[in-house]
Image: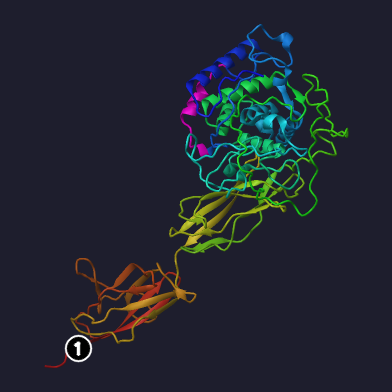
Amino acid sequence: MSALFGRRLRRGATTTAVAAAAIAALSASQAPGAIPSSAGGAQAAADANPPAESSATGNSPYYTELPPLTTPDKPDTSVDLPTIGTGPAEAGIPASVLAAYKQAEQALAETKPGCNLPWQLLAAIGKVESGQARGGRVDADGTTLSPILGPVLNGIGFANISDTDDGAYDGDSTHDRAVGPMQFIPSTWATWGQDANGDGRKDPNNIYDAALAAGEYLCHADRDLSLDADLRQAILSYNRSQEYLNTVLTWFEYYNKGTHEVPDGTGVLPAGTGPVDPGPSPSPTPTPPPSSKPGPKPPKPSDPGTEPSAPGSGGPEEPSTPGGGGSTPPSTGDPGTPAPKPVVKRIEKTGTGTHTAMAGSEFTERASVRAVDAAGKPVEDVVVRFEIVGDTDARFTSGKSVLTRTTGEDGTATAPAVQAGEQTGEFTIRAAVDVKNVAGVEYTASVTARQADGLTTTGDKELTAEVGAEFADQVSVKATYKGAVAPGVAATATMITSADGSAPRTDGPYFKDADGNPLRELKDLKTDADGTLQLPKIYADDTAGTFLLRIETEGGATLTVELKVTAPPAA
């Protein structure tokens, strides 16, 4: 086994320097590989790290042991450098774990061909995160024999991430912990979890599910992992540490030079306990098993007596069960292999209703899309991102403007209802998937002004005044909409010339403006929270008679009030 360069529970400059030295030594001792000579770009990215919870692992601890400074499986081609470890086991990857990485590579080559994900990158991350699932200690379905949990992320020595799964995955209902062979924190697994072994569950403790989820996570944002900048960005997004980047890149380079299959349970575990902490047994994962019979199972691990495949063969030999029955690892056309997931070719709208709501109310229509493959068949478990775009204060009922939903068996994902704000006008509800060359769709939505369809006076007194005096009572009305009070409704009040006219009068009763001048039309009025509108005081000029005051609201509610001006009594 290799000597341990440093086990990270707290990062330090020493291990970072050693990792950098190892990269240089590997680059000098072997043919050009995946590790570029400069780490400046990655360091700049690391210096601008977002919070820990934005990474896949929550920046939880990882193994910092580095590979031997020899080319795996090709000792005759290595230069004479001091070695850290000896023997072929360092390059060996447990059968089920290796099969899971290669299956994930194959699946993503179909669903995200532009990503160019190499399985060796998954192997490098799996080595650093969990020592390849604790040396391949998994059952026949690829699920770890006991939970692999990181420490409690309670802010003491690590990030502080409050519980997001009610302890379903990590057994902790107070704080989160990284879970499984690829060490996902529960909140990240909720978004990126996959069912790669066809058993109807998305289980972070299953190497097939976890490997595909890790690949999906590394590939998102249209990354092309054949490009150095995208490769580094992807690794740093998994765990935002320059030391982590260096360590993963050394193993990536190492596995690119060759590796071989070893029986499950016989892999080399990095020295020390590292991040692996069994902790309390977590509750079953929230995703229930399907009612129909489970899908095909992944291959069983190799028998300890099985000979490893030859170096450079491109895949493991056919493993066998302890009882002698053979089963092949996942490969195209193998009847025991989970069928490849359908490839999303487009998303389409499923609703044709009008997305219109009055200010302050909830939209009755919801944005909904269906993901389909090239044959037009629905695709399940596709993450759809819904976003409210435009100059609006409308939000989903959760208060968010961006959220994700996953398609069901019918390929459909539906966003929550949208709550209109007070800002009127049009905006867009956009739906998109993180699949290259698959265009998003948009719904146009609009918010109209608050309305009233009814107006009534709140008093029954006759409104009278003598010429040259003010009316003793103020006009007060109540606005309603569909029988309920209508708050915040715009209104106007106009002294009109006749019942069938709308032009303002030039004589008769009047309001006053801020300077005390007569005003016979008021605009920009608005009902209060109770739907009530009380008008300012009204004054009479020297014209006696009966006059009409018309009040109108947005939505068409109208009320006409009589105002009587009498001459003063005779002396």
Image-quadrant location for residue 237: top right
Which x, y percent locates residue 226?
64, 26
- Where does the image place residue 8, in percent across and percent down from the top left? 54, 27
The answer to whether one can see residue 95 in this image is yes
The amino acid type found where label 1 is placed reads: Ala
Whether 273 is among the magenta residues is: no
Instruction: Decide which of 407, 533 is in the foreground and name it.
Output: 407
Q: What is the count of numbered marks?
A: 1
Residue at 72% from the left image edge and 11% from the top image edge? 75
Give the image quarter of residue 328: top right
Residue 518 sits above or below residue 373 on the image: below
Q: Position of residue 87 (x, y in %)?
A: 72, 16
Please name the residue that numbered disc 1 is placed on: 567
Q: Is residue 492 above or below residue 297?
A: below
Q: Is residue 430 left or right of residue 48?
A: right
- Quadrant in which the C terminus appears: bottom left
Question: Which segment is the magenta one?
Answer: 37-53
